[in-house]
Amino acid sequence: MIGIMTANGWRITEQRRELAEIFSRAEGYLSPKDVYDQMAVAHPGVSFDTVYRNLRLLSEMGALEQFYFMDGGLKFRASCLDHHHHHLICINCEKTLTFEYCPMEQPLDLPGNFKIINHRFEVFGVCEACRKE
Amino acid sequence: MIGIMTANGWRITEQRRELAEIFSRAEGYLSPKDVYDQMAVAHPGVSFDTVYRNLRLLSEMGALEQFYFMDGGLKFRASCLDHHHHHLICINCEKTLTFEYCPMEQPLDLPGNFKIINHRFEVFGVCEACRKE
DNA sequence: CTTCCTGCAAATCGTTTGCATCAGT
DNA sequence: ACTGATGCAAACGATTTGCAGGAAG
């Protein structure tokens, strides 16, 4: 992630280094507030807008993936850049696992003569740890 | 949709009747503002909160499906209650078509011992009409 | 006639912006 | 030193809430 930042000519500030740390440590999705709270531990005095700004920049750059949770709003996760995959997401703790199967591998018979650009496929469930509670 | 409302013991007000009209007429997703604007035509004097309130209630009741567009925010659409299906969505005009193929029909080999609850699968593209522009 | 629904206004939440200061190169 | 990044405060848009009056049953 630091690599992506320098490659795009950004300065590596304390806060950005910390951001990268946080996302490499995270197992699942983080809300802006989660990120802010974690930032504040090692780096008290950060401001919300710095968090937001960098989340947005990193998303535009492709270093972060966004996902909107119906309850909880927009959250972020370090994106895996090296291969296409989909996610299995725990609806309780939001931990995510990747899997390789993609429904678009086979040609689908879709209606209406669209030019296909993109697709999303996510599976939601409760992970083993959360099932025990 | 009116049926769902009465079945849940809600009163059928002018505004709610109009809401049902709007969604049965719509081909794609509508933002709260879209709904408000269309309401205001036949029914000037509606307030935003009435729109929001009823959108939320109808969503909780399952009469509306929500979808968060990365640009444009949360939008709504009458949900098709009689069978499971997925959507093909035009990223330009947001017109949506349904299709019957579901990747979960076959058992998938997913990691991590999750209890599967739910899934989403959407295909995005540009519809024939929008391609011509 | 009672209860629920509406419309208004104000509150709240998440996010963005303008600007002076500070830090990275 | 120069330029871009930060922190602060204030602005902003979208959504929610409290409350009095009005309409549906």
Image: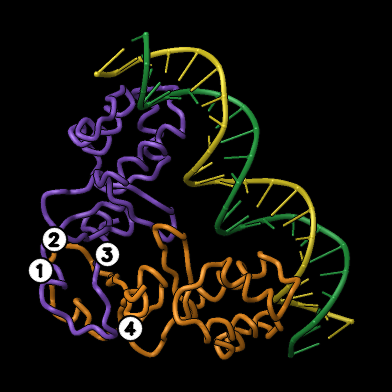
Chain colours: A orange, B purple, C green, D yellow
Q: Are marks 1 and 2 on the same chain?
A: no
What residue would you read off at disc 4? A98
Q: Residues within 10 Å of mark 4 (few under 14, many from 20)?
A: some
Q: Are marks 4 and 3 in contact (CB under 8 Å)?
A: no
What residue would you read off at disc 2? B99
Tell me the element at label 1. loop
Q: For this view, does B44 lie left or right of residue B60?
A: right
The quarter of the image holding the N terminus of chain B is top left
Q: Residues within 10 Å of mark 3 (few under 14, many from 20)?
A: many
Q: Are marks 1 and 4 on the same chain?
A: yes
The numbered mark 3 sits on a residue in which chain?
B
| Residue depth check, mark 1 versus mark 4: number of the one nearer the observer | 4
Spatial separation of the CA atoms under disc 1 and disc 2: 9 Å
Q: Tell me the amino acid under the disc marked 3.
A: Gly
Q: Are marks 3 and 1 on the same chain?
A: no
The numbered mark 2 sits on a residue in which chain?
B
